[in-house]
Image (cartoon, rainbow, N blue to C red):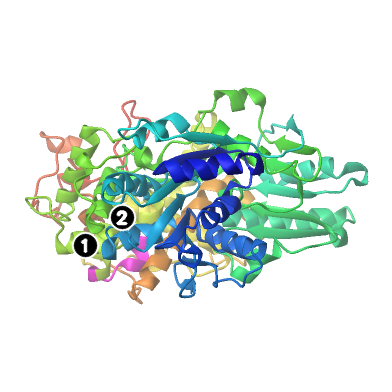
């Protein structure tokens, strides 16, 4: 970065937009704001506005601000500060403002021309989140009105030519400057493993730690994991493993993820003597540099939100990472000495992965994108200058879904329900179910079902054990509704954890007489409340019943997030169990497009008739709401 410092400064002087591509460790994140200051940008340096510097995550915005302030020998907030949700550490007269992409996007509502800034640095553009794509499109429209504004777009794995063409002007494409990082060589070791009841990810990580520290070699280890729950479980397993190996006192195990308190995050950056293992989400891929890392353990997984065209709901699931993300992870070691990256998958698997991570807009519900754009007053989605515009058919489907949810009117303007949905950080279908459940006093149960629809089915049905799986799953069956079966399954899972199960009173095989009368069905099953099982015991219990422990963790994570959203809005969870009707009418509000006709009820067998009456209480109804359509092969049953 230092070798290119003068080139970058000259490019910023001469061009409105500069693209900076830098390897991990090149110093671009901390050096670019200082270059802008030296050019007289920023209020304190004689400029006409702030130097705005965006990061995809709160943890990165706050830590980068502290790092730059330290390098400038300035108290945090005086010259360099940050603003994230619920925290603002920026004094009047400061020059550099670190913030999340979402903060800058929100500021476009009160300051459409972004007059508060004379320079903007959009960092980590390769992540291609919706916020980043919205910002890059908005800034493309803004630059002709703000010829004084300077824009720097940076990334480690950016598709430089695509971004350069996006910001092309009469003078041609935006200039691209490549900067290299100073890295020691990094050895790649491939250690694939086959998951079983006795051996899983936690054991593979422990073996990797043993290999790296064999022979008393030192050096800190950075382990990447998909989420908070996996971090907690890996930490517990490593503490026990190292204690058995009599290394517990000599190793410190620290978590790193976005929701940690500031004090807990800061521990990772403090000087230390003992060997250290840092367990991190993908926040440590590019957003943060963890000091002193010599080794990396990469399971090759990340939690990704992706729209399911079959269920018509966005799902948060664990997926293999791209080659670019894998390279970023390996680049986190080799900073202090020769590095080693142990990958818990094989080289053939790596070679088969896509080069880059899919942009969020290409894996999102266009209904959700349209909602956000309307709430932010960004204009029509079909006219917005996206770097990669979504297909027209997807846009039309998005509008159709919003109309179905009563979120837009005849001229595609937001309704009252649409404005409420736009304020929820949720898939529109799931949000609509929750809004209806709020009105019908069924939030407790609907949060469980909605979170289940947001992940892959937790029930496994391997072909070689299909009959055995079916027998085990019978305990969760409900002859009238699989939604009620999901509640039964949730309650059974929570019994193993020794806790209260939301929706328990409504779970289980329904009392047909009680359901028809509109009263809650009785508690499920003959299994009495269990004492809290250990993680290992609970995992074995799940596997014995052909239930995926990993997908259960995802289900519980989503449920926790939905609960947080409800709490933030001050909505009250129902204290008494909801009835069958309350639950299903709430679900139906988000599933009108999935109403089908029973095959034994005669034609027609599809469609979502508006204003359809509820099924008769005296015989099975012709119309059936489905959460997921069956696959063409018929192998995947519909959720009804």
Chain-order first, disc 1 or disc 2: 1
Q: Main secondary structure of the magenta part?
A: helix
Within-10-Å neighbours for mark 1: few <14, some 14–19, many 20+? some
Q: Which numbered circle lies on residue 419?
A: 1
Asked if residue 446 is among those painted magenta in the image, a careful observer would answer yes
| Count of numbered circles in the view | 2
Q: Secondary structure at mark 1?
A: helix
Q: In terms of image quadrants, where is residue 171?
A: top left
Q: Is residue 17 visible?
A: yes
Mark 1 and mark 2: span between their CA atoms? Answer: 15 Å
Q: Who's the residue at 40% across and 57% down the image?
A: 118
Residue 260's x, y, as percent?
58, 65
On the image, the x and y values in percent for residue 308 come to 35, 40
- Residue found 90% across the figure and 56% down from its top: 246
Q: Is residue 451 left or right of residue 615?
A: right
Residue 477 seen in this snapshot: no
Is residue 11 highlighted in magenta? no
Q: Residue at x 16, y 36 (%)?
A: 606
Q: Nearer the viewer, mark 1 or mark 2?
A: 1
Q: Position of residue 452 (x, y in %)?
A: 40, 52
Q: Position of residue 245 (x, y in %)?
A: 88, 52
Left or right: where 43 falls relative to 412: right
Above or below, comparing residue 266 to residue 596 in the picture:
below
Label placed on residue 566: none
- Asked if marks 1 and 2 touch (Cβ < 8 Å), the reply is no
**Residue numbers of the magenta segment:** 439-449
Residue linked to disc 2: 430
Where, by quadrant of the figure, is residue 398 drawn?
top left
Q: Quadrant of the N terminus?
A: top right
């Amino acid at each position: 970065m230092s070798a290119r410092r003068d080139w970058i400064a000259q490019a910023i002087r001469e061009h409105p937009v500069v693209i900076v591509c830098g390897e991990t460790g090149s110093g671009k994140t901390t050096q670019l704001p200082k270059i802008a200051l030296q050019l007289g940008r920023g209020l304190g340096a004689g400029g006409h506005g702030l130097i705005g510097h965006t990061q995809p995550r709160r943890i990165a915005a706050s830590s980068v601000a502290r790092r730059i302030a330290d390098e400038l020998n300035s108290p945090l907030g005086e010259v360099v500060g940050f603003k994230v949700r619920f925290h603002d550490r920026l004094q009047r007269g400061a020059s550099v403002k670190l913030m999340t992409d979402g903060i800058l996007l929100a500021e476009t509502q009160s300051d459409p021309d972004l007059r508060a800034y004379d320079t903007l640095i959009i960092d980590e553009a390769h992540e291609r989140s919706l916020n980043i794509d919205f910002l890059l499109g908005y800034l493309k429209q803004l630059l002709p009105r703000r010829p004084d504004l300077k824009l720097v777009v940076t990334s480690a794995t950016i598709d430089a030519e695509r971004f350069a063409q996006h910001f092309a002007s009469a003078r041609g494409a935006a200039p691209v400057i490549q900067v290299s990082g100073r890295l020691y060589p990094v050895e790649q070791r491939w250690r694939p493993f086959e998951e079983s009841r006795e051996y899983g990810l936690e054991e593979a990580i422990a073996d990797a730690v043993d290999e790296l520290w064999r022979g008393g070699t030192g050096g800190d280890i950075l382990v990447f994991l998909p989420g908070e729950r996996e971090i907690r479980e890996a930490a517990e397993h490593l503490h026990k493993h190292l204690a058995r190996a009599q290394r517990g006192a000599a190793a410190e195990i620290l978590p790193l993820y976005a929701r940690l308190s500031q004090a807990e995050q800061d521990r990772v950056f403090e000087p230390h003597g003992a060997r250290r293992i840092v367990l991190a989400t993908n926040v440590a891929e590019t957003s943060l540099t963890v000091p002193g890392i010599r080794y990396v353990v990469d399971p090759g997984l990340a939690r990704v939100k992706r729209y399911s065209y079959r269920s018509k709901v966005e799902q948060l699931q664990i997926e293999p990472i791209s080659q670019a993300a894998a390279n970023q992870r390996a680049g986190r070691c080799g900073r202090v000495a020769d590095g080693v990256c142990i990958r818990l998958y094989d080289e053939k698997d790596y070679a088969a992965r896509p080069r880059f991570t899919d942009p969020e807009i290409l894996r999102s519900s266009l209904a959700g994108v349209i909602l956000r754009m309307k709430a932010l007053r960004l204009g029509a989605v079909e006219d917005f200058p996206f770097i990669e515009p979504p297909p027209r058919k997807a846009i039309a489907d998005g509008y159709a879904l919003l109309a179905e949810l009563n979120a837009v009117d005849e001229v595609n303007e937001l309704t009252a329900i649409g404005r409420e949905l736009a304020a929820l950080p949720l898939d529109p279908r799931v949000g609509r179910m929750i809004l209806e459940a709020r009105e019908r006093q069924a939030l407790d149960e609907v949060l469980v079902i909605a979170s289940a629809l947001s992940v892959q089915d937790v029930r496994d049905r391997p072909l070689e054990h299909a009959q055995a799986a079916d027998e085990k799953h019978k305990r969760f069956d409900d002859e009238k509704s699989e939604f009620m079966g999901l509640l039964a399954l949730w309650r059974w899972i929570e019994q193993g954890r020794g806790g209260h199960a939301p929706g328990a009173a409504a779970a289980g095989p329904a009392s047909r007489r009680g359901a028809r009368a509109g009263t809650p069905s009785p508690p499920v099953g003959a299994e009495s409340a269990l004492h809290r099982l250990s993680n290992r015991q609970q995992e074995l219990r799940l596997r014995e019943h052909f239930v995926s422990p990993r997908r259960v963790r995802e289900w519980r994570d989503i449920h926790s997030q939905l609960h947080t959203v409800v709490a933030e809005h001050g909505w009250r969870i129902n204290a008494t169990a909801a009835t069958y009707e309350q639950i299903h009418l709430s679900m139906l509000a988000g599933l009108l497009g999935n109403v089908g006709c029973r095959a034994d009820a005669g034609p027609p067998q599809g469609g979502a008739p508006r204003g359809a009456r509820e099924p008769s209480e005296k015989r099975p109804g012709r119309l059936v709401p489905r959460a997921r359509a069956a696959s063409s092969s018929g192998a995947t049953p519909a959720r009804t």
